[in-house]
Every structure is written in structure tokens, then in C-alpha cells.
Image (cartoon, grey):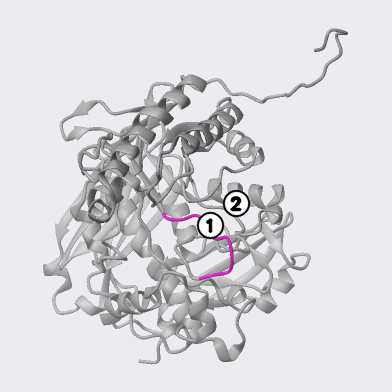
Amino acid sequence: MDNNQFVLDSKEYSIGLRELTVSTKKDEWGNEFAFVINGIHIFSMGADYIPEDCIYPWITKERIEALIRSSVKANYNMLRVWGGGYYPSDTFYDLCDQYGLIVWQDLMYACNVYDFTEEFEKNICQETVDNVRRLRHHASLGLWCGNNELESAWDHWGISETHSPLLKGDYIKQFEYVLPKVTKAEDQATFYWPSSPSSGGCLDNPDDHDRGDCHYWDVWHGMKPFSDYRSHYFRFCSEFGFQSFPERKTIDTFALPQDCNIFSPVMESHQKNGTANGKILYYISENFRYPKDFDSLVYVSQVLQGIAIKAGVDHWRANRGRCMGALYWQLNDNWPVASWASIDYFGRWKALHYMAARFFAPKAGYIYTEGTKAVISAANETLENQSLTVTVRIRDVELNVLFEETVEMTVKAQSSIHVLERDFADVIGSKKRRVFAEAVYTWQDGTTSTEAESFVPYKHMDLLQPQIETSVTEKDGTIEIQISADCFAPFVWLEIEDDVIFSDNCFDLTSEETKTICIRKEDVLSGKVLSADNVRKTLKIRSLRDTYEQ
């Protein structure tokens, strides 16, 4: 107010009361890295967020909310705001508060070397003060992180050999003295972490698996197989990723039919990771048969991306306690492009995002195979003990049951459990290319999920061509699609003319039972008024067997 008692300025805040910090206490494996809400250690699940558009005025509240809602639908509890982007608008944080997402907030420094002059110090201190004051009241704010990958860069990217050691000293000063001091002066309540990845600072082995957070790129950049994830027990994996192409509707916004070859000039200009298209083909060759056409290749790339990220998340959730977080790179795109995103520029969910909704589910099951052995686990992130029944079957591709065993157990609150490990050589015999393992999870509230895994790479499976039957009905404004198959149909993908979010997609049909897929009014992204008739007319379905002739 001024001297005449007139209000000159005011601001209204929405706040939430909670205690939120990060625990790095010592344990049997080293030092944990776990977000703790009101005294409860949570397993962090989500992705890294980048700016939503190259042209910032095009980022509307509606687009931001659609992205946040899609994150929640995929069972995220956290978003990491990447330090190579920008500080999002107030709307972003308001929506994270509203929808219950924790924000890991990088300060805006990434993958670079900074000359810490007096002028630069003054500039960044004011920038930090402005943003900390703007954001500190948000219930969603969980962590301030000094930068993205600068500590790694100094440790093992080779810049120590090409830059003055004085700049290394500047790094320590900037991120371990000046910025934490400024941040703490404005926000005493929020945990500060010097870099991502980091084991705690001072350039002390920032990729230490037993302390702090890690970024892991040997799968993808290092061309290692997906099974390599199971060799690593990070305390918190805050970045790992795998690329895919966006769906054909998105590609058609920038490419003509004659451009639809992944090595065409247009497709390569929409790929900014150098040899990434070749990497995708390499991983296809390791896992699937060569796709028969461009559309099949696009679909297979998305399946590949999904199973890559799932392999990491499954392993780390199965080892809850030792690992306490998995944030994949990345949630979104800022232009139509081949990328690591699980949601493309137009808000269309890739296969990965549908898979994330399943592997990030509060109650989830996991299965992997090695040779003729299957390992089955379950995770319960709820606050209550859960009774669980798991039915394990070995089926052939004709859906005949060759083995069945039911296991009953209680999964304690916020824990994972080993369900079954068995060598099925006696069951499989010489049929390794024609069988798969199936685990059906039934929880005490009646919710069910099914996990399936082959014993050989899918490229070596003798898959049959499934006859998939559907019926489409409408009830209370919701479209229901009933779908079934007469044989094993992995990675079934649905699409219609309109842009919608299905209740599930890119799923396996492992029995003759009918699966119900819903489209709700609020999940129509764009298109005509949704009707059962329109869905019947435009519904297209593919599974893995449709991608090759022989």
C-alpha cells in the first residue's frame, strides 16, 4: 500500500501443506537417493520435460494441461524440468500442484562450460532469485538441481583436457557455493542437489551407482542390449532413453509420400541425433524381422522404444529400496520429429506412453526370460499391504496351455516381491520358438494385468497371423471396443481417424478372452464428434505379425 492506503499490487497463491525432501542417508548399498513425502519414501516415476514448442507464444494453458493430464494418466508422480530448456510458466507449476506431480527443477545450465566472471555471477544470481521467489511456494516443487550433466562433463567428457583448470574451479564455485547459497537464502525448505547426475558434488565420481542419481545411456548410445539394464542397480536413474519415430499422422505433416524413407533428406532433417536412424535399424535387427514397409517400420520403432524403457523400469522397480526412481528421457517434443519422447509434438501418445501407464502403475507385475528361465516379480507402491494371486502359464502360439501354476502372496505396502523363478526347459522342449510365458496378476481389489514374454527374440518366433475380431458399442458417451484373437498377438496397436487416447494400447493378446478398450469423451484430442459408427468405419488394428511377410 502507499501512504494513502491504496493497494498498489497484490498476488494470490494456492498452496499445499506437506513435508517434501530427499534422503541420502547411508544404507547397506551405499547412500540412498529417495524423495520423502510426509515421512514416506516413494519410488519416483516419470520423465524429463523439455520446452513444449520452439515458438514459446504457441505454448498455451490448454497444451500444458493436456501434457500434464497425459502424465498423470500414465501414472507419473514426477517430472524433471531439464536444465537445457527454460523455466516454465506459472501455469505449469499450478497444474503440477493441482494434479499431484512432484517437480525436479534443474536450474537452467546444461552440457556447457561457463566463465564465472563478476558480471556473469551478478546476472545468474538475479535470475536464480527471481525464479526461486516465483516458484518456492508450489507444493509440487521437490528439488532444486544446479545443472544438467556439467559435473559429468568435467569428470569424463574430456573437457578437462581442452579447458583451463581455472574453469573447473569456476564450476565448483558456481554450482557448489554461489547458487546453493542464493537458492537457500530464498528457499530454506527445498533440497538442493549440485548436478544431475551427481554423487553429491566435488566432481567425486558423478556416475557412482551406489550414491546419488545416474544418467544411463549404454543402451541406445552405447548400443548395448536391453538386458544390460539388469546389470545396473542405480540408486535413482534420472535419465535414460530410446528413440522412435512419431506416428504416420505426424510424419504426414512434414513429409510427402516420396519422402517416407527414414534416410530421405526430409526424414533425416527431422532427426537431430546424428546416426540415430541407423541405431533404430540396428536394434530392430536385434529384436524383430525387417519391416515390410514404412508404416510397419514406424510402428516397430515405437514398440522397440517401449520395450527398451520397460526393461529398465521393470528391473529398477523390482529392486525397490535399492533403486528409488526411474525418470526416462523424455516426455515431450517441441516440434514434429523422431525423438526419445513418449508423446509427440501434437500430443499423440506413442506406444511407450501406453506401456508407461502399465509399468508405472501403482500395482504392477514384471517378467523377463533368460534362455528357458522365467523370472516374475511384482511391485506395490500403495500405502497398504495387497493380497495378490499370480497365475503363471507357458502357452504356445496357438494359445494352448502347456504349464500352469498359481501363486498367492501378500505384497507389503511400498515394496517389491519376487514371485517365481523357474527353468521351463522340461516344458518347452524343442518348442522354444513357438511358446511364451504369461503371468496374470489379480490384486485384492479385483484389478488385473497380464505380462507376457517370449523365450527367443521376437524375430525368431514362429508367430501365426492372428485373426482379430472386434465389436464396437457406445454406452453413456463412452466408446467400448471388444477385441479378441485366435492366437498369440503381441503388441496389438489400435488407431482411428480421430486423435484419441485409448484406455490401453500396444498390448498383448495372450488368450482367447475378450479385452475391452474404452475411448472417453475427455480423451478425444481432435476430430469429429466421436461415435461408435465412426470408430467402426475407421478402426485399424495391427500386431507384430503384420509387419513382415515371412
Which of marks 1 and 2 precedes in the sequence?
Answer: 2
Quickly name the residue at label 1: 332
Could you say which is closer to the camera, residue 65 or residue 216? 216
Residue 368, position in %: x, y?
25, 60
Task: Tell me if residue 435 comes above or below residue 107 in the rendering.
Answer: below
Tell me, yes or no, if residue 210 can be seen here: yes
Q: Cβ–Cβ below 8 Å for labels 2 and 1?
A: yes
Q: Which residue does the image show at 46% across and 25% down from the upper left? A: 182
* Region rendered in magenta: 329-337
Quadrant in the picture for the C terminus: bottom left
Chief SS of the magenta region: loop
Q: Secondary structure at mark 1?
A: loop
Say if the magenta span includes residue 332.
Answer: yes
Residue 332, position in %: x, y?
53, 57
Residue 465, position in %: x, y?
41, 84
Task: Tell me if residue 205 comes above or below residue 133 in the rendering.
Answer: below
Give me the disc on residue 77: none
Mark 2 Cα-neighbour bin, 10 Å: few <14, some 14–19, many ≥20:
many
Q: Secondary structure at mark 2?
A: helix
Residue 401, position in %: x, y?
28, 68
> From the viewer's perspective, is 97 left or right of 294?
right
Say if the magenta span includes residue 373.
Answer: no
Quadrant in the picture for the N terminus: top right
Label 2 sits on what residue type? Answer: Leu
Q: Nearer the viewer, mark 2 or mark 1?
A: 1
Quickly name the residue at label 2: 67
Tell me, yes or no, if residue 467 can be seen here: no
Q: Which residue does the image show at 34% across and 31% down from the upper left? A: 176
Task: Give the spatial CA distance, label 2 vs label 1.
Answer: 8 Å
Label 1 sits on what residue type? Answer: Asn
Task: Tell me if residue 281 comes above or below residue 163 in the rendering.
Answer: below
Q: Which residue does the image show at 15% across and 65% down from the upper left? A: 424
